[in-house]
Each structure stands twice: as C-alpha cells, then as structure tokens.
Image (tube, helix red, strand yellow):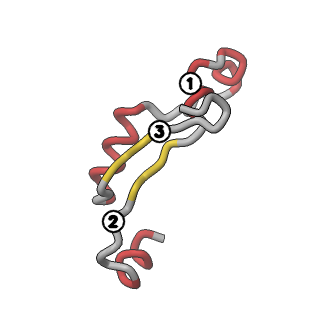
Amino acid sequence: WMPELRRFAPNVPIVLVGTKLDLRDDKGYLADHTNVITSNQGEELRKQIGAAAYIECSSKTQQ
C-alpha cells in the first residue's frame, strides 16, 4: 500500500505505529509468539519506508 499512498498523497507524512506494546512483557503471549517486533526493528522499518516517525502504544495500558 505504500506505493499507492506515495502516488495519491505524496505530501502526507506517514507515522508508523507499533500497537499492543503491553504484550512485549506478557510471558503468556511470548510463549506462543516468537515474532514480536522490537523498537529497533520498528525504527529500521520507519527508515526503510521513509516514514516521518515511529511510535509505540498500548490501548490496554494507555501507554
């Protein structure tokens, strides 16, 4: 979807959002899911796609 966004809205800044931040510390979740994205990985993806910012949040903990 990035090519479409760049084509039809070239001047709109992109903010990459990592959600469910609370699950990074949830041992039960981590036991079943080994593909948790780190902050560094999110930041690297931000650079790769040319996003203006990378932020992380959790609706559960209000972070």
Look at label 1 and name its amino acid. Arg
Report helix, strand or loop for mark 2. loop
Q: How far apart are marks 1 and 2 (CA)?
A: 27 Å
> How far across and how far down the image is residue 48, in percent?
29, 54
> How far across and how far down the image is residue 8, in percent?
40, 84
User: Of tags 1 and 3, which is closer to the observer?
Assistant: 3
Give the labeled residue for mark 1: 24
Q: How far apart are marks 3 and 2 (CA)?
A: 17 Å
Look at label 2 and name its amino acid. Pro
Give the labeled residue for mark 2: 13
Sequence-wise first label, 3 or 2: 2
Q: Give the residue drawn at x 44%, y 79%.
A: 4
Give the labeled residue for mark 3: 56
Q: How far apart are marks 1 and 3 (CA)?
A: 11 Å
Q: Give the residue drawn at x 35%, y 72%.
A: 12
Quadrant of residue 60 in the image?
top right
Pick out the residue farthest to the front: 62
In the rendered view, would you say 62 is above or below 19?
A: above
> How far across and how far down the image is residue 62, in percent?
59, 33
> Tag 3: Cα neighbours inside 10 Å, few (<14), some, or many (≥20)?
some
Sequence-wise first label, 1 or 2: 2
Sequence-wise first label, 1 or 3: 1
